[in-house]
Image (spheres, rainbow, N blue to C red):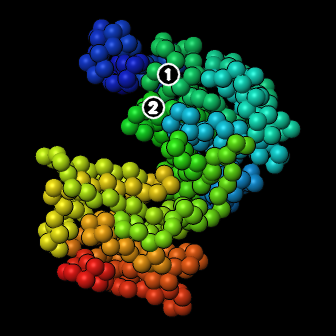
Amino acid sequence: MARSAPQFTCTACGAVHRKWAGRCDACGAWNSIVEEAPLSAGPAAKTLGASRGRAIPLGTLDTQEAPPPRTLSGLEEFDRVLGGGLVPASAILVGGDPGIGKSTLLLQATAAFSRAGLKALYISGEEAAAQVRMRAQRLGLTDAPVQLGAETNLRDILTTLDTERPDLVVIDSIQTMWADNVESAPGSVAQVRAACHELVTFAKRRGCSVVLVGHVTKEGQIAGPRVVEHMVDTVLYFEGERGHQFRILRAVKNRFGAADEIGVFEMTGGGLSQVTNPSALFLSERGQASPGSAVFAGIEGTRPVLTEIQALVAPSTLGTPRRTVVGLDAGRLSTILAVLEARCGIPFAGLDVFLNVAGGMKVSEPAADLAVAAALLSAREDAALPADTVVFGEISLSGALRPVGQTENRLKEARKLGFTTAIAPARSKIGAGEGIMVKELPDLTAFVGDMFGAG
């Protein structure tokens, strides 16, 4: 049998090297490269055949298995994002900006699950137990049967979990965990990876659900190696702006439910309260029709959500006009501006463009293209769109309007909130009896002519 070549890994950044070196070429750290022994290099490999594993049981694709049982917390928005409740032996990673409310949300969820009959533990590595108790008093959760601990040593935490045998454990946060068998500082790539592996393995072995809190980088990604997101079953992002009271819990990965599902919460003095009708909340402060405003009928996961897209176009005093975007992709805005100029003859040169999604909502689906174009044209022409009109549709580079999915759900949500007219691409699949008048337009030029009398 050929001998396995040794592998060297940097404990600071996770880079793999073919040989040992004093300095990592990837991150520049000194004395951070260690050797990782392959499976066949253990003590048992010295005996004949000891390096071979056992044969795993195999099945066919038509094997029928019962769906996993779920436990509902009673927080409908949280249960929705999880895919319909908490699955036993699942590993969940929750990320978000500092101070956005991750600890508050998970403390409320842990208390709800404990009241639903689960044995729940909350392990804090960032705050003392007294600080967590003060938050629980403010939230009115002191009567919940949640066991609380404050520790960062991973070995002590795993020993406690083996003794207590909980159904749910929350680790706040994974970046503060320290494994004494890894020679690097807490929060490093190697420490985060090792701690996450041990906790996920414990979850699968003991049937305990583990929720890990993760810090995010300035780019908005969860700090640490991306392999952590691959290890866990579900990845949730808690989004929102500190200046807004709205918070959005978004699933970007879920092995037990739909991805891109969202739950909407409102930050109050007594914690996070659920928002069962986010469309009405996002449009609650919308007054009379004004230039630069368009209502977009979007889909987040399985839920239709109406949001207001606001635009401001003003003469620029700079050589290069500003393009400021909040809540949308800046590259998509540049594409829409180019299509408006090339296909409709409407230039934005010499004009500053500011675009915003009201309420702190983030929109990523291409169906928002037509609503963005409507807001831009409304602001440029200083002409308000009708207040009872919603807009959705994707714009191609040729200027054609492309149909989008779940048209009927978008129209039902718009009708429920009192909208009477919708502007959508031609060839959209619209069912009968939606109770709303739909203007189907083939391209962007027809839209400009219909709404603003030019083309």
Residue name at image x 31 percent, y 20 percent: 27
In the rendered image, the vertical position of residue 170 relative to residue 246, given as above or below: above
The secondary structure type at the circle numbered 1 is: loop
Residues at discs 1 and 2 in contact (Cβ within 8 Å): yes
Residue at 36% from the left image edge and 68% from the top image edge: 291
- Please say if 19 is above or below 227: above
Q: Position of residue 227 (x, y in %)?
A: 44, 35
Q: Is residue 81 above or below residue 2?
A: below
Depth order, front residue of 122/320? 320
Examine the rendering and report whether any part of residue 201 can be seen. no
Position of residue 199 measured from the top left corner of the image (x, y, whole percent): 61, 31
As measured in the structure, the alpha-carbon distance from the residue carrying label 1 to the one carrying label 2 is 9 Å
Tell me the tag on residue 223. Answer: 2
Residue 395 higher or lower than 193, as above or below:
below
Q: Amino acid at mark 1?
A: Gly
Tell me residue 128's x, y (percent).
Answer: 70, 20
- Asked whether, in this view, residue 258 is left or right of residue 377, the answer is right
The answer to whether 337 appears left or right of 131 in the picture is left
Left or right of 337 in this view: 129: right
The extreme bottom residue here reads 432
- Residue 12, how many percent across, how many down? 40, 19
Q: Residue furthest right?
A: 143
> In the picture provided, is 136 more to the left or to the right than 224?
right
Residue in view at x 72 percent, y 28 percent:
132
Instruction: Please name whichever residue, 432 or 211, is drawn nearer the observer in this view of the structure.
Output: 432
Determine which residue is flagged by label 1.
187
Who comes first in sequence, dot 1 or dot 2? Answer: 1
Amino acid marked by disc 2:
Ala
Element under disc 2: loop
